[in-house]
Image (cartoon, rainbow, N blue to C red):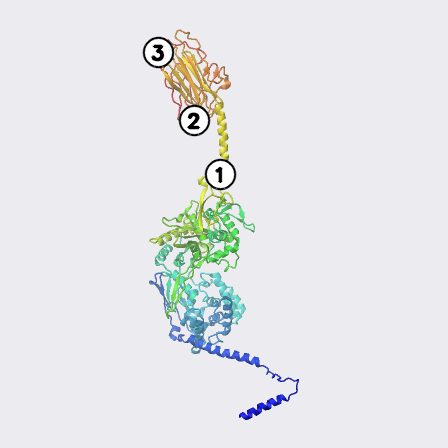
Amino acid sequence: MSDNYRSREERRRAMNDNKPEGKSQGKPKKKKKGGLFRKIVAAVLLIGIIGLIAGVGTFLAMISDAPKVDDSVLKNSFSSKVYANDGKTVVKEIGAQKRTYVQYDEIPQVVKNAFIATEDVRFYKHHGVDFYRIGGALMANFKDGFGAEGGSTITQQVVKNSFLSPKKTVKRKVQEMWLAYQLERKYSKQQILEMYLNKIYFASGEVYGIERAAEKFYGVKSVKDLTLDEAAMLAGLPKAPTTYNPVTNPENATKRRNTVLNLMAKNGFITQAEADKAKQVDVQAHLAKQTESTSKYDVFIDQVIEEVKKKTDADPFSAGLEIYTTLDTNAQDYVDDVMNNKVVNFPNDKFQAGLVVVDNETGGIQAIGGGRNRVSGGLNFATNMRRQPGSTIKPILDYGPAIENLKWSTGQPLKDEEYHYSNGTPIRNFGRNYKGWVSAREALGRSLNIPALKAFQATGADKAKEFATGLGLKLDEEDGEAYSESYSIGGFRTGVTPLQMAGAYSAFANEGMYNAPHTVTKVKFPDGTEIDLTPKPKRAMQDYTAFMMTDMMKSVVNESYGTARAVRTPGLEIAGKTGTSNFSAAEKQRYNIPDAGEKDVWFNGFTPNYTISVWTGYETAKDGYILSPNETGMAKNIFKHVITHISEGKPKGSFKQPDSVVERSVEKPTGKDLKRPSGSTPSSLITKEYFVRGTAPTKVSQTFVKKEKEEKKEDKKEDKKEKKDNKDVKPKITASYSGGAISVNWSASNAASDTTFTVTMSSPNGSEQLASGAGAGGKTISNPAAGATYSFTVTTNTGESASSSVKVPDSSDQATEDNSTKPEDDGTTDDNQNEDNSSTDQNNGSDQGDDSSTQPDDNQNSNNGSNSDGNNSGNNGNTDNNNNDSGNANDGNNNSNNGGTTPPPADNGGSDSGSQTPQTPATPSTPSTPATPQQEPTTEN
C-alpha cells in the first residue's frame, strides 16, 4: 500500500514537473454552487431542531403540573369566602346558590349565535385553540404589553374558569391551551358551549348562567323566550357586567348591544335589516322591575366581586377563593344605618345619596353607601352613578395644578370681576356679585367661579388634565370630550362618582401620594396561590401642593366666609369642598323646576385619617329637585355624622407642614402682587399665608407708609396752624363797680371753639376761682367789701393771660360814682374799650353740635354798651342760660346735663351789671363772702 502510494505521489509530481512554464501551477478548484446556502440551511435546521427539542422540553415541563380535566369541577362550583379587614371575620360566603342549569337543546339558536359571534366566531372550526385569533392577540400584546388582549376561545375560557389561576403568565397560557385541546378531545362542541353558558357571570347579586340572567333582567320564565335584542344584550354583558348593565348604565349598554348585533350581521347569523330593527328597541324597554332587596354588606360585596373579576379573571362564585378585603364592618354598619333613615332624616323616599369612605394612607375602602331603598343589582349611587361635581372639582382642575406648576401661594391675588370664557360666553358667580381682589384661599372658601376659571386659564388645560389623571380622574376618555374651560367649575357632560372623588381627595390628605381606592387586598386560590391586589402608591403631586391645598380647604370649613362651616366637629381637623350643579334649561321647563332648584349637591371632605365623598340628589329630574335647607345641607350633614362616628376612639392626627412650605405674614390683596406688611399696616389687613419655600414675597408694602406720611404731614400742618392760632389768642378781662356790685367780663380775640378760660379773683377774703370753661363769659360779685380792692385774672388753655382790678368805694363816697377800672397792663392791648356789637358772641359753639341758629343766646351781659359772649358753652346739647339777677349772689350758671335747654330765670326787674338804670345801693353792711361759682360740666375729647 505504501509503495503504491509513493508511486502515485511520484507520478503526480512528475506530471506537474512536465507542465509548460508560464502556466498556472495550481489552478484553483471550481467551487460547487450552493455550498454556502447549504451551510446556512443546515445551521438553521440544526438550530430549529435544537429549538424544537428545547421547546418541546419546555412545553412538557410547563404542562407537567397542569391539572387534569375533571368532570366534577366542570359542572360543579365551589363557593368563595369574603373576609373583613381584620383578615379573620368571614362576612359572606358566595357561591352557586343562584344558578339555574339549562341544557344545550333548551337554549335558543339566537342566544347561541349571539355569544359565538361575540366571543368566538370560529368556535366550530378550531380544536380548542384558534391560532388566527392568537396572532391578532400577539400583535396587540406586542404593541400594548403582555396581557393587553387575550386570544382565548370559548373552550379556553371554560378551562380558565374551571381549573387555572388567573395569573397572566406564559406558563398559565400554555397550560390553558393544552387543557383546551384535552377538553375538545373529551367533549363535543355542544357540551362545551353548554358548560360555558351555564357558568358565566352576568351581574351582581350572584347572577350566573344564561337562564338566571334571562329571569333577572327580563323576567322571562325560560331562556327560550328571549328576543334578538335581549339575547344581544346578554351576550354583551360578560365582558364588563357592571359597565354594560342595562339597569344602571343604559347608555353604555346600548352601545355594547349594538356592537353585538353588528357582529352577528357581519358573520352571517342575522341580516343587517334584522340588526337595524333590533337596534331601534330601547335597551330598557323590556327590563323587569328589580324587586329583590339587598342583604347585609351586598353593596360592598358587589364591588369586591367586580374587582376580583377585573384583576384576576377568576370567578368568585365558583373558584373556591379566599378573598381578603378592606371592609370595616363598624363603619359599614353605621353607613347602612344612615342610608336607612336611622341617623339623618331624609326629606322623602325618592331622595338619594351615595358615599364612599376611604383610608387615606392605603386607599382601602372602609364602607360604601350605595343608595337608599336599593334592590339587588340596582344602581349603585356610590360607584356607578356619574354626576357633575360642581365646585368640588376646583381643587383638582384649578388651584391644585396652579400650585403644582406655577407655585402659587395660598394667598395668590385673583380679581373677582365681570368676566367671560375665551369664546366670549359670560361666566358668573353663584351670588351674581363680585368681590374684587381676593386671595386664592378666600376664592375657594367662597366658591367663586371667576377666580377658579382664571386659575384654570393660568395653568392651561393640558396641565389640568395631567393633574387630574394622576388622581385617577380620566375625565375626557369615556365621553370623548377635550378639556374645555367649563371643566374649571365642573361642567362636564357625564361627570364623576363618589368613589373617584374620594380617591382623588385622599391624595391631598396623604401628602400627595395617590392610592387607587380598592376593596380587595389579596386573593388566595385553592391550590395555595396568592395574588396581592393592593395598588401601589404613586406620587400625584408635590408635598407642598398637597399641604397648601389642604390648608385652603380647611378655610372652607373654618373661616366665616366658608361654605362648609356646618361640618365643623370638635377635636377633628377637617378640610373639604362643597359643590352643586344645576338643571339644564330644557329640564327646568319640562319638569317645572324653579330657578333655585339644584340637581346635585356634594361634599368631599377629609381628616388626616379618612376621606368621605358624599353625593345627594334624585335619580332622575322627574323624581324631584333640591331646594329646601334640609336638602341642600344633607351632604354635609351625612359627612359630619359619619366622620364623627368612624373617628371615635382613634388618634385624630393632624396635617403636617412639610419643609418645602413656609408661612409668612402678608397684606391682604389689593392688587396683583403680594407684599409684606409694614409697621404702618393695620392689623386687620394683615394675614398669614403659605408659600413654596423660596417664593415668599420680600418687598414691604408702602401703601400705609405713604398714608402715614401723608397723615403725619397733615398733622404737622394742623399743629403748626394750631400753634399759630394759639399765639394769636389774646385774652381780655374787665372789672367795674356799679350799683353795689362788681361786674367782671372776659373774652379773647381770635379764640378757637375749643379755647377755655380760667378766671380767678383775689379779695380781702383770699383767692378763689370764679369760673372755668370754654368760651367767653362774665360774673357779678354782689355786696363787695367797701374800700377793698378786688383783682381778677383770666388764663386761657394756651397759656395766655390778662388781669384787671377794681376798688370798691368807701361808704363815704358817692353811691353813684363809677369806680370801673381799666385792665392791668399785662403787655397786651386792651381791645375791649368801647367795643361795638361786632364783638358779640365770640364763642357761641357747642361741643356736641348745637345749632346756633336755633338755640338762643341767653347770656348777653351789657358792659359799657358792648355785648359780650354770654358763655354759651354747650355740653351734651345743653344751652347755658346765664342770666343773673342783680340781687342774686350766685353765678347763675344753670347747666342741664339731660340734653334739654334750661329756660332762663324769671326776670325780677333787675339786670346784669352795667344795666341802664342804676339802683341806689343798699345800706352798707358786713360784706358777705361771694358764693363759690357752680362748676360747669366738661367732656373728654
CB atoms at circles 1 and 3 under 8 Å apart?
A: no
Give 761 or 44, whichever is nearer the viewer.
44
Query: Which residue position is annotated with label 1?
Result: 704
Which of the 4 image quarters holds residue 906? top left
Question: Residue 312: horizontal and vertical position, in percent?
Answer: 42, 66
Residue 110 visible in the picture: no
Query: Which residue position is annotated with label 2?
Result: 877
What is the secondary structure assignment of the residue under circle 3?
A: loop
Residue 455 visible in the picture: yes
Please rate how many residues cluster around mark 3, counting C-alpha atoms within 10 Å: few if below 14, some from 14 to 19, many from 20.
few
Between tags 1 and 2, which lies in front?
Answer: 1
Give 469 or 254, whichever is nearer the viewer.
469
Please rate how many residues cluster around mark 1, counting C-alpha atoms within 10 Å: few if below 14, some from 14 to 19, many from 20.
some
What is the secondary structure assignment of the residue under circle 2?
A: loop
Question: Residue 486: horizontal and vertical position, in percent?
Answer: 51, 53
Among the two numbered marks 1 and 2 on one chain, the one whose residue lies closer to the N terminus: 1
Label of residue 926 in the image: 3
Q: Is residue 738 above or below residue 456?
A: above
Among the two numbered marks 3 and 2 on one chain, the one whose residue lies closer to the N terminus: 2
* Relative horizontal placement of residue 17, taking residue 219 as reference (left or right): right
Among the two numbered marks 1 and 3 on one chain, the one whose residue lies closer to the N terminus: 1
> Which quarter of the image is occupied by the C terminus?
top left
Amino acid type, residue under disc 3 in the picture: Thr
What is the secondary structure assignment of the residue under circle 1?
A: helix
Amino acid type, residue under disc 1 in the picture: Phe
